[in-house]
Structures are given as structure tokens and as C-alpha cells.
Amino acid sequence: MIRLVITLVLLISIPAASSAQTVAQIVEGAKAEKELLTYATTQAPVMNRLVQGFNKKYPFIKVEYYRAGAEKIAQRFDTEAAAGRHAVDVVNLSGSEMYWTAKKGSFAVYDSPERKSFRPSYKDKQGMWTAQYSTIAVIGYNRKLVAPADVPKSYDDMLLPKWQGHIGLDQTDDDWYMVLVHVMGEKKASEFIRALAKQNVEFRRGRQLAAELLAAGEWAMAPTMRIAAGEEIRRKGAPVDWVAMEPLFPNPPNALALARRAPHPNAGKLWIDYILSKEVQDYYANEVGVSVGRTDVVLANERLRKLRYGEIDWPVYLEKLQHYQDEWRKTMKPY
């Protein structure tokens, strides 16, 4: 009797074979759908290359896309859903917008076969979104203003009196505060930003502008410089370098999700699979210069390859986003 009960429990717990599509079934479904629409934050040159690569693999699918910032895409998606207009198949949003849109039940669960190759920090546990890429923050510094002996070895080194008035941050760096909470714990991270605020930090808007200010000597240090920006400006001959506080953690990822009411769900699944494929992730990591979560992608840059990376459960922090934003803005006064 016990054996029978156990057998029944196991049978009930195993999903029916018909509930999961095979790749062949998805492809056949996409052939019938013939098209897909994606809303994307991706830069136009990158997006055009992705579309070309996808069309080589699936020439029977016409790809259309609408490009905008994450906030504008989220607003458009919500407005259309509220009006009962379901036009988009795949939505691409950055961290906080993806998290809160997913919480509304706007996305379908799609456990792409590519997801198994991604680190935990780059996907949600429910199977609704996966990161197409993220960014990594390092401490950038101007080599003419920061001597080798003075390069920070810890976050606390930036609190030394000599750096007062010589540190620059982006106005939108509240995501860095959440990383600090993850690294230090909430109490110490709060104490750290209160001490940092006393350093007369200068705030500007724009990652590229931050790199340029660092290169020009307007700032001695930029604690949230993106690795890609730092490497690019170094290659151009600027007196800029960076140091990493290891292990490094990705910023809230730029992710993909299948719309719950997608009119072309099979074509949408193929698009997601393609973007998450090793081929595209290698392109993102080694040509675009962003951070990816695929464990089988090998970084061509030896310096980046040797860095240690940690994991962060972003939904835990994004759930308290307003709290962290309020504390950051009240303490640092970035605006």
C-alpha cells in the first residue's frame, strides 16, 4: 500500500509530457506565426546585428522591434495591457523595471533550455526572465592624480581626507548602494555612505561622461565606473585605470521575458533562446564588452578573465528598492 501511494505521488509530481514543447514543436509553431515583435533597450547597431543573426537561423520569421529606455518600454507595455492590446512577444527591460513588471503577472514562465548555463545572479527563480547582459562596477581612477601606492585596496580607502572633493558618482548610483548592502551588510553600508557623503562627492548623469571627466582629471576617482567604459578609454590612451573590489557582483541585469499574452509565443521563445545562446552571449561579452551570465563563455580579456565574481539575489534587494533609493538620496543628495 505504501509503495502504491509513493508511486501515485511520483506520477502526480511529474508534469505530463504533452505540457512541455520540444524544440521541433516550437520551430513548427513559429513557422506558422511567421513574425515577432520585441520591445528592447538594446542599442540600434547591436540590435541590428542580433536580428541579422537570428534571421540567418530562422529566415521564416520577420523580426520587428521598438527601441526605447526601460522606463518608457515598461510604461508602454503596461498601457497596452490595460487597454487589452497584446502586440508584443518579448520584452527587454533593465533590473528594477523587469522585476516590478514581472510581479504584476505580465510575463509567461519560459524555462529556456539555455537558462541552465546561466549563473543564479542572471536569472529569476520562477523562470520568467533571464539576463541578456549586465554591467560590472569597478573603482576607476586617474593615474596622474592617484599614485600607485594610493590606489584603493578597500572601499574605506576612499574615505581618506586626501580624496575630499575628488570623487565623482553618477546620479543614478542607488544600485551601487544595494551592492554595498550585499557586501557589507545594511548597517555598515549605511555608515559607509554617510561617511562618503562627507567627501563632497560630485554627481553627474551619464556613464560615458563620468569616464571622460575621469580622463580629463576633473575627478581622481569614480567608484562606479563600468569595466567596459574603463577598458575602452584606456585603449584610447587616457591616463585611466581601475581596480576591482573582489568578488565582483553584477548590477541589476538587463533581461528578457516572454509576454504572457504574446501573439507569437513560439517565435518569441526562439528569439529568447537565440539571445541567450553561447554565440550571442560570447558576442556581448567579447565585442560589446558587457558582463554575461553564461558559464561557458570565455572572456578574451585576460585581466577580466582572472577576476572573481560573486552571486547576488537581485529580487531580494529590488523588493526593497524604494527603501534603498530613499536612503541613498537622503544621504548622498545626488540631485
Image (tube, rainbow, N blue to C red):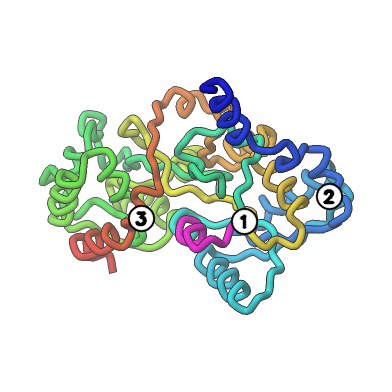
Name the residue: 17% across, 56% down.
197
Q: Nearer the viewer, residue 313 or 82?
A: 82
Dominant SS in magenta:
helix
Q: Is residue 302 above or below residue 323?
A: above
What segment carries the magenta color?
98-107
Which disc, if any, is residue 210? Answer: none
What amino acid is at disc 1? Gln
| Mark 1 Cα shell of 10 Å, populated few (<14), some (14-19), many (≥20) | few
The residue carrying mark 2 is: 29
The residue carrying mark 1 is: 43
Whichever of labels 1 and 2 marks the residue nearer the N terminus, that label is 2
Q: Quadrant of the C terminus?
A: bottom left
Rendering coords of residue 22 (x, y %) = 77, 37
Rendering coords of residue 189 (x, y %) = 19, 46
Residue 62 placement, left or right of 198: right
Asked if residue 312 lies in the magenta stretch, the reply is no
Q: Which of 174 and 46 is in front in this view?
A: 174
Whichever of labels 3 and 2 marks the residue nearer the N terminus, that label is 2
Q: Are marks 1 and 3 in contact (CB under 8 Å)?
A: no
The residue carrying mark 3 is: 319
| Mark 2 Cα shell of 10 Å, populated few (<14), some (14-19), many (≥20) | some
Rendering coords of residue 85 (x, y %) = 68, 74
Name the residue: 54% across, 57% down.
93
What amino acid is at disc 3? Glu
